[in-house]
Image (cartoon, grey):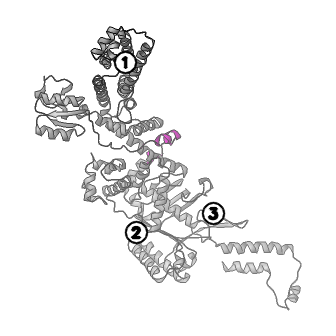
Amino acid sequence: MDLESIPGVGEKTARALSELDDPEQALRAGDVAALATAPGISQGRAARIARGAIRHDHDDPGGFLATDRAREIYREVLSLLTERTVTDYAAQRVETFYPSSQRSRIEQVQTFAREAIARDPAPAVLDALTGVEPLATPGDVRVRERCLATTDAERYAAAREAIPELSVEIVEDAQGLAELARGYSTVIALDESFAGVTVEGDVQVRPDALEHPAEIVPERPLAFFARNRDRITAAIAVHRAADLDPPSDCDIDALEDGLSRLEADGTVAGDDELDRLTVAVDDLDAAVGTAETVANDHLREAIREEDVTIEGSDLLSLVERGAGVDSLLSRELADEFAAAVAAAREHLIDALDLDSGEAEVARRTFGDEPTFPVERDEDATARLREDLTATKERRAGTLKRDLAADLADQRAGARDLVRNALELDVELAVARFADEFGCTMPTFVPAADERAAGFDIEAGRSPLLDEPLADIDPVDYDVSGVTLLSGVNSGGKTSLLDLVASVVVLAHMGLPVPAEHARLRRFDDLHYHAKTQGTLDAGAFESTVREFADLAQGGEGSLVLVDELESITEPGASAKIIAGILEALAANGATAVFVSHLADEIREMADFDVTVDGIEAVGLVDGELEVNRSPVKDHLARSTPELIVEKLATEASADGADAAGGTAAESARTNGGAETVSEPQFYDRLLEKFE
């Protein structure tokens, strides 16, 4: 696939995408998470690229949504899906669903949607999804206690490229290795010529090191899992809550066990020996200081309680030799000093929980030569710190290598695990949408039958109405060819157009539609013209007519929905213009529904037998219209004024019957002899005008 052939992908973006392991597969699958790992590609940008790639793959020219109102309907139904996602990923992923005229794309999404609506969006699954995010790339890893060493300049360059996490040093001989070993916990010699060389410190000869970077730098795979530990753990919870089969290359139990042994900073958790060494290194200075206090407190108490007697000759001898209190301690309090030092040593060993080998080094921290106050031997303390640190690092390195070996083979499986959890969120959003709006999968007529077909919706409920589903009256409506839709004000004509548009848009997205049954042709595009607010000026009027002229020239396969086009100009002219538009659309084989209060006038002016359907008001109840929301086929609906006049006539007739008794003569007398029209007669004559 030529990446730059994808709509919206230029040279710079193509370079970024080419850094992915398999950009073509990610593009074909609409894998927003994978695309978003490319340098400089956000999730929103990834969704747009994925949509362009899908169009390219299905040879889809786009342009299904041909008007602003059609695009608004799409954004509104898409937002209903987005609102039912849990993760940011799924919210971006649903952006890859778009209405298409291509059968292959529709069928592809339908396959996905049929599986999706069978999912159970259980609360436990939705709760587990809150912790799932696309996997992140860890930052640069730097390991300072280890280094690589080589005598060869070419190998030096290769090592820096293969294992950038470690310092690479050039040495000339074994002496150079020895010097490095004094500054690093571990030195890895890359040259086979160093085999058999004995050097103090942890020096490993690994000519194959560059071929096994995970063994040399286990921090590399561990950094990935540490950075994504919570995300992977959440994905595991999702799979268990939803009872999903894990990817074939993923052992969930082993992965979970490995993650439980890993700290957020990439260190290994749960090892008592490493914990002991870490505490010993961290607490060394404090423990030595306390040990000094123990020794001095012990010695001070001994001196305070000891009754020391020195003969004059002995005192003179000590002074002549320049001796001080140390000599006095050595001579008179040797046992007490030894006991004080022993107490200090034991305190240090116990406080740091040192093993026998470490204890021998620790004892050197306090010398045997009597002094007061007792002080640590700084060189011995430094040596103890170095030994403990080196032991800790070796232990940590061993544990890291073991854990990295356990987790290294799980990386691809972990990626699939998280991706599947994120995709499940997309499926559950579709399932929740379908359940909450009473949706079903629509049926498309075969290609051979498309020209004679339009749409047939049974028990449809518009998802765009701001009312509970149970409070929305179900609507049945089917149209083939060109139809005028009449009806009373506030009878639901616009809501019906919105329902039709929603069904058609969702069906062409490959998704379930808000109806008990829906059958339709595969349309090429949707032209939905919303009601115009007020009469248009000459320029706007001309532009509107031009739009319909273009549609009339190539409208076959189009669905045209128009809401009260007559408002663009004077009623008489509007009826003529709409009649002409309908004639052109009918000739082209388009499917169209025009809502109009001028249906009777338009029907008279059209040169073909245009169908007129009506949303019929069955009466007025407490001043409110009672409406049959499903249009009656081939029926011009009565207007609201007609219903009101009919109601007044009925009421007046009833009142007149109750008050009967007046005579024509009386009427004539009260009106100068002229015959008057009674109230019931007045209303009856008005009703006749509507016939």
Residue 154 placement, left or right of 128: left
User: Residue at image x 26%, y 49%?
Assistant: 19
| Residue 556 image label | 2
Residue 37 coordinates in the image, percent (x, y): 32, 48
Q: Secondary structure at mark 3?
A: loop
**Range drawn in magenta:** 113-136
Q: Amino acid at mark 2?
A: Glu
Q: Amino acid at mark 3?
A: Asn
- Mark 2–mark 1 distance (CA, rounded to whole Å): 92 Å
Image quarter in which the C terminus is found: bottom right
Residue 314 lies, with reference to residue 94, above or below; the image says above
Q: Amino acid at mark 1?
A: Ile
Q: Say few, some or many: other residues with alpha carbon within 10 Å of mark 3 (under 14 / 14 to 19 / 20 or more).
A: some
Q: Say few, some or many: other residues with alpha carbon within 10 Å of mark 2 (under 14 / 14 to 19 / 20 or more).
A: some
Mark 1 or mark 2, which is nearer the start of the sequence? 1
| Residue 628 image label | 3
Q: Secondary structure at mark 1?
A: helix
Q: Is residue 135 magenta?
A: yes
User: Residue at image x 19%, y 27%?
Assistant: 204
User: Residue at image x 37%, y 11%?
Assistant: 333
Residue 369 coordinates in the image, percent (x, y): 30, 15
Residue 287 coordinates in the image, percent (x, y): 39, 24
Marks 3,1: beta carbons within 8 A: no
Q: Quadrant of residue 263?
A: top left
Residue 686 placement, left or right of 145: right
- Mark 3–mark 1 distance (CA, rounded to whole Å): 91 Å
